[in-house]
Image (spheres, grey):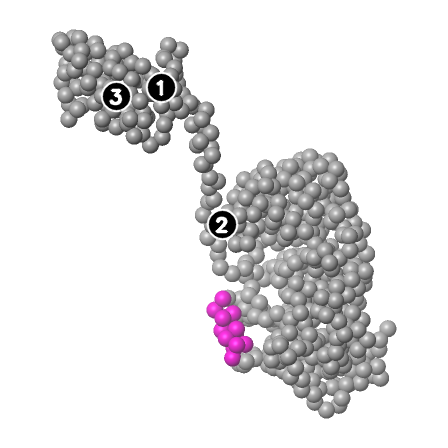
Amino acid sequence: MIWGRVVMWLGGHRWLPVRLQGCLNLRRLSAARIWGSCWGPMAETFSTGAEAATGLRAAVQQNGDACGDARGERTSGSPEPVGPGVEPAREVGKQTPLSEEKAPVAASGPGKRKKRRDAIRERVVPPPKKRRAGVSFGDEHFAETSYYFEGGLRKVRPYYFDFRTYCKGRWVGHSLLHVFSTEFRAQPLAYYEAAVRAGRLHLNEEPVQDLSIVLKDNDFLRNRVHRHEPPVTAEPVRLLAENEDVVVVDKPSSIPVHPCGRFRHNTVIFILGKEHQLKELHPLHRLDRLTSGVLMFAKTAAVSERIHEQVRDRQLEKEYVCRVEGEFPTEEVICKEPILVVSYKVGVCRVDARGKPCETVFRRLSYNGRSSVLRCRPLTGRTHQIRVHLQFLGHPILNDPIYNSVAWGPSRGRGGHIAKTDEELLRDLVAEHQAKQSLDVLDLCEGDLSPGLIDSTAPSSELGKDHLEEFAASAQKMDGAVEAAPQNLDTMALAPEKAAETDVVNQEIDPLCAECRLVRQDPLPQDLVMFLHALRYKGPGFEYFSPMPAWAQDDWQED
């Protein structure tokens, strides 16, 4: 209504409403303000059509300059504001205090407005990416590095790896500095500060600039590290059977089933993918890393679910063989002692009335004067069930690095007698294996342990902050080359066995990596073998055997 009258009275100057409307949008003026600043002055000066047009053109021109102020584009001839609550004076009409117009925010200088906008601006977190269900590894993963064999051991060449995770609930509201200092103690804080300078830490795929940034729900973290894997036995993973449903292998001792802890390529899943081109496999059961024998994988999710249902219904029969301390009774022994997990992190259990019900059937096969070979049938599936029950019976597995350890005391846990608290037991176990440089037996590294369980000479703390700062710049240069390496993954995927030849970046030494500066003594191959072997798995419509290991033969003698 107002614009129609203005256009009519101006005699066809239709550009004025457009310009006035633009000013309205930028300054968010109300209709009442337009009435006071345009319509009122125009009525007071209106005498002829020409005079009205001249007066309004002057008023509109001045309003346009005010709009330029709001955009931060004031011209040299435009008037300066006379105060935070008063508009610049106009040639036509009178000044109107903003406080009388009930404006939501009083006008202020451009600098104050910018600070106010920055103060309320919040970091936007992108929505989480949709990930495919299940764990799957392909050629791009298998080509990350390669194997080499030395001294009866399978070794993995050091390589760069991106740890990826979404922000956990307990991290929300805490800074990255807090998270690294409380939950990722494998490295000193100086390392993470150097990693930031080297561009190795990313938040929502943007390089982290400051560890003081506060985490939010759905934040996505990516941390590039130089990864070293412990060696495992060089014994091959042999195929026992393969059909359209399953793959069955004879797993050597010391090799984990799937990636966990420090192990990734030195696992059965990766060895089968890299050396046998068997991919997209689903483990049907698990074996401890030090346990050897029959290991089954399903080729499809449907087969996996079917056999897992048989496991839940206890339709599977499992049979193990082991060599234990001393002369085991000749008659069948049934142990039903409940088992309690002492520590999930360290992986230690013991017999305790508060534990879960268990049952294992033992029968002696042979005795050589010092040790006995037993056939074991676990009727339940608790963690370390066979090993814990044998310890309780006073016949621990001959070379069990956990349950035949002096850390349990003089009786070594026989009859459940342990003359120390759980905390003392864990501390003594860790101290024993740390002294032997064999924490991998406990699936641990120094950074996994609380300060009370480890001494102050942790390898990750040996490099000072000053040295880390010196290395950060060279690490950044190396990472620039490593970032370009993925373009060769397609080539390496076609021939994984040639991955080492096609690498354009030497990944084996990293300036920020503490592990690169350590000299670790390799374990002996026989130290990676525990005398516990999965001999047979039987279920509805299938039965698989593995050969009896050499240490279970009647004529075997200890060295």
Residue 416's image quarter? bottom right
- Camera-side residue of 72 and 275: 72
Give the residue number, with chain letter if any, for mark 2: 217
Q: Position of residue 99 (x, y in %)?
A: 32, 26
Q: Determine if the magenta segment contains residue 303.
A: yes
Q: Which residue is mark 3?
A: 20
Q: Secondary structure at mark 3?
A: helix
Between the residue at mark 2 and the residue at mark 3, the CA separation in whole angstroms equals: 45 Å
Bin the neighbour count of mark 1 within 10 Å (Cα to Cα): few under 14, some 14-19, many 20 and up. Answer: some
Q: CA distance from mark 1 to mark 3?
A: 12 Å
Query: Of 491 and 14, which appears nearest the observer?
Result: 14
The image quarter containing residue 316 is bottom right
The tag earlier along the polypeptide, 1 or 3, is 3
Q: Secondary structure at mark 2?
A: loop
Pointer 2 with pointer 1, Cβ within 8 A: no
How far apart marks 2 and 1 lie (CA) works out to 41 Å
**Residue 554 placement (x, y as % from top left):** 79, 82
Residue 147 visible somewhere in the drawing: no
Question: Image height check: is 439 above or below 466?
Answer: below
Q: Residue at x 69, y 48 (%)?
A: 187
Residue hosting label 1:
68
- Which residue is at a point 74% across and 86% down the rendered structure image? 364
Q: Range of the magenta residues?
A: 301-313
Q: Amino acid at mark 3?
A: Leu
Mark 2 or mark 1: whose residue is earlier in sequence: 1
Quadrant of the rendered structure where residue 392 is? bottom right
